[in-house]
Amino acid sequence: MSRPELLNRFNEFWRDFNTVNRWKFPESSPYSLQRWLDLDLRRVNYEEFKRAEWMWNRKPRSFLGEGVSGYLLLVFVASLLLLIPHLGILLAAAWCLAMVVAIANDTVRRARWRREYEAGMVRVIRSGREAK
């Protein structure tokens, strides 16, 4: 990978990480959104709805899981690494840095997925309203 390409990827990552997310819909399945928006499934474009459903099934899982337990595990492992003589601080710092990178990657993956999913749902809604 060339240096400009690597810098371009990092810039895209940084932009997605720092994007202020203004979501249009609650994070729900296409069927739930269809009921929430009161759309008639017979009027929407079936291919677009199936694509949105496929996107929903591709929703990325969180690296640390849901809730606080993953973060507590992260802190616990870092605390254990501090107990190792001579290398503990270095290992704990490396562990924390790796976890920060993993969490940032998780955040970016989720934001990109959400942006694509919402674009698909907008196409579904538009197809349903155009059919009226």
Image (tube, rainbow, N blue to C red):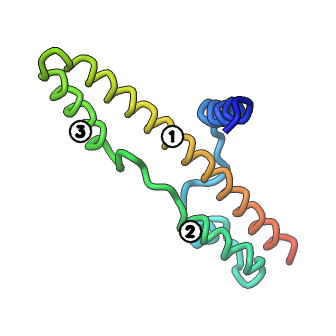
Question: Going from the N terminus, do you reach mark 1 or mark 2 first?
Answer: 2
Disc 1 from disc 3: Cα separation: 18 Å
In this orientation, which residue lies closer to the viewer: 110 or 27? Answer: 110
Question: Going from the N terminus, do you reach mark 3 or mark 2 first?
Answer: 2
Residue at image position (64%, 32%) is: 10
In the picture as drawn, the residue positioned furthest to the front comes out as 2
70 relative to 109 in the view: left or right? left
Residue wearing tag 2: 32
Question: Going from the N terminus, do you reach mark 1 or mark 3 first?
Answer: 3
Picture coordinates of residue 67, whole percent (x, y): 32, 45
Picture coordinates of residue 27, whole percent (x, y): 55, 55
Instruction: Classify 116 as above or below 10.
Output: below
Residue wearing tag 3: 73
Is label 3 in contact with label 2 (beta carbons under 8 Å)? no
93 relative to 47 in the view: left or right? left
In this orientation, which residue lies closer to the viewer: 3 or 126? Answer: 3
Instruction: Classify 34 as above or below 68.
Output: below
Any mark on residue 69, and which? none
Is label 1 in contact with label 3 (beta carbons under 8 Å)? no
Looking at the figure, which quarter contains the N terminus?
top right
Residue flagged by tag 1: what amino acid is it? Asn
Residue flagged by tag 2: what amino acid is it? Ser
**Quarter of the view holding residue 43:** bottom right
Disc 3 from disc 2: Cα separation: 33 Å
Residue wearing tag 1: 105
**Quarter of the view holding residue 42:** bottom right
99 relative to 125 in the view: left or right? left
